[in-house]
Image (cartoon, rainbow, N blue to C red):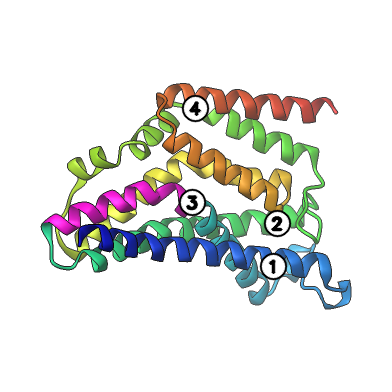
């Protein structure tokens, strides 16, 4: 019984992930196959942006955050559901509330990313196709991501993300409000762990699907690999700093 319930929750989460990636693949296909005259592109001038432009860019980032971050949260989601099965008669409802609150954090962060993209277009750091055309932007983002990997905040947030049961033991709250609070707190800590890595999309091209997949894999490896978080953080930091240095030298 417990196993079947676990499978059903996992199936829903995986369905959301597949749908998000499917939407991203469709958007990318439209960008590369549609005639320029029929293609929507963000305006280059900040003053030319309309509500629909902000809405389309925001929806792109929101779906991207769900596609990239939900896979790494699966161990925490399943651990939360297992505890709910032992403590309540409605584990599915609480599990979905937990996931919703987790995603809400990333959806809020998507607003920040949308405003950053608006500014970068205004500075001509991004092309209308949302590709990077500024070495300063690319190097700055990679150096920022690399330096952050060595910060205590990064190590603390990653340690939290790698210890689902530790989080549940220390932060457990009962009921629907408790599920929302816990999901929001886990999302906030996850954001503290990965926000700089998400900015790398500005360096490699906002709709660069291989880069999305690689960053998603990096986040999963960081959280799932049974290696001390401090070692993983420093290794990632070295990679980002070397990448930025190579770009700076080109």
| Label 4: element kind | helix
Label 4 and label 3: CA atoms lie apart by 17 Å
Label 3 and label 1: CA atoms lie apart by 19 Å
Q: Nearer the viewer, residue 20 or 148?
A: 20
Q: Which residue is mark 2?
A: 207
Label 2 and label 4: CA atoms lie apart by 26 Å
The answer to whether the residue labelled 3 contacts the one labelled 1, judged by CB atoms less than 8 Å apart, is no
Which numbered tag is attached to residue 233? 4
- The C terminus: image quadrant: top right
Q: Residue at x 80, y 62 (%)?
A: 44
Region rendered in magenta: 69-86
Q: Which residue is mark 1?
A: 27
The answer to whether the residue labelled 4 contacts the one labelled 1, judged by CB atoms less than 8 Å apart, is no
Percent coordinates x, y for residue 40 in the rendering: 77, 73
Which numbered tag is attached to residue 69? 3
Percent coordinates x, y for residue 246 in the rendering: 77, 26
1 or 2: tag closer to the N-terminus: 1
């Amino acid at each position: 019984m417990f196993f079947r319930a676990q499978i059903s929750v996992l199936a829903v989460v995986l369905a959301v992930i597949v749908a998000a990636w499917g939407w991203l693949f469709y958007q990318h296909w439209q960008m590369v196959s549609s005639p320029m005259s029929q293609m929507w592109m963000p305006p280059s001038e900040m003053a030319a942006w309309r509500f629909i432009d902000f809405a389309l860019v925001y929806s792109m980032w929101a779906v991207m955050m769900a596609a990239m971050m939900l896979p790494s949260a699966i161990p925490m989601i399943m651990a939360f559901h297992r505890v709910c099965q032992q403590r309540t008669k409605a584990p599915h409802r609480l599990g979905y509330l937990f996931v919703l609150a987790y995603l809400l954090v990333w959806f809020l962060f998507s607003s920040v990313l949308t405003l950053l993209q608006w500014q970068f277009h205004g500075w001509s750091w991004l092309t209308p196709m949302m590709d990077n055309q500024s070495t300063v932007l690319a190097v700055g983002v990679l150096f920022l991501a690399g330096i952050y990997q060595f910060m205590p905040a990064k190590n603390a947030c990653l340690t939290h993300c790698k210890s689902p049961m530790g989080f549940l033991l220390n932060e457990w709250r009962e009921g629907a409000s408790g599920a929302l609070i816990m999901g929001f707190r886990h999302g906030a800590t996850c954001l503290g762990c990965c926000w700089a890595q998400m900015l790398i999309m500005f360096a490699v091209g906002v709709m660069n699907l291989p880069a999305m997949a690689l960053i998603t894999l990096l986040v999963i490896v960081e959280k799932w690999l049974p290696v001390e978080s401090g070692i993983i953080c420093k290794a990632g930091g070295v990679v980002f700093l070397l990448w930025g240095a190579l770009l700076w030298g080109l």
